[in-house]
Image: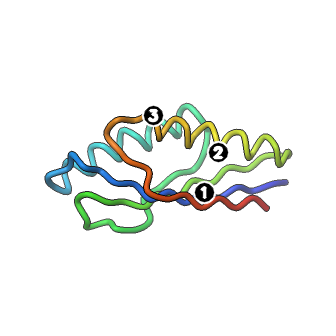
Amino acid sequence: MHVGIMTIGLGIPGAASLKDKRHVLRSLIDRARRKFNVSIAEIDDLDCWTHSVIAVAAVSNSRQHTNRALDSLLDHIEANPEVDVEGVDLQID
């Protein structure tokens, strides 16, 4: 069994309130859960309007599959025009 954990720092430049931020994140998180079958949640900067940190966890029987799934998810997030990826930390055990 291989567990991949990715932490992603996000900038949300269009957010003018926590409500705007949560709308963007809720949409992003819901789509990622459905499309990639991963666990994902906001873990830091909960009260900051223009920044967030999310964590993603994926489990598979293959290290390569776990890595591909998380890489695809990161590509999906980077393609979203409402957020800017500011930093990524990936660990696969």
Taking the spot 85% from the left edge, 46% from the top edge, the residue there is 61
Whichever of callouts 1 and 2 sits on the residue coming sooner in the sequence is 1
Please give the residue where the numbered disc 3 appears in the rendered image: 79
| Mark 1 touches mark 2? (CB < 8 Å) | yes
Q: Quadrant of residue 28?
A: top left
Q: Is residue 74 above or below residue 57?
A: above
Q: Which residue is mark 1?
A: 6
Q: How many marks?
A: 3
Q: Is residue 25 left or right of residue 92?
A: left
Nearer-N-terminus badge (1/3): 1
Query: Mark 2 = which residue?
Result: 70
Crowd around label 1: few <14 · some 14–19 · many ≥20 (10 Å): many
Label 3 sits on a secondary structure element that is loop
Q: Which is more foreground, mark 1 or mark 3?
A: 3
Which element is circle 2 on? Answer: helix
**Residue depicted at x 15% and y 55%:** 17
- For the point 65% across and 58% down, the residue is 90
Alpha carbons under labels 1 and 2: distance apart: 7 Å
Cβ atoms under marks 1 and 3 closer than 8 Å: no
- The amino acid sitting under disc 3 is Ala
Q: CA distance from mark 1 to mark 3?
A: 17 Å
Please tell me in which quadrant of the rendered image residue 92 appears.
bottom right
- Callout 2 crowding tier (Cα within 10 Å): few <14, some 14–19, many ≥20: many
Which residue is located at x 21 percent, y 45 percent? 14
* Left-right relation of 37 to 81: right
Q: Quadrant of the N terminus?
A: bottom right
Say whether residue 10 is left or right of residue 7.
left
Choose mark 2 or mark 3, whichever is in front.
3
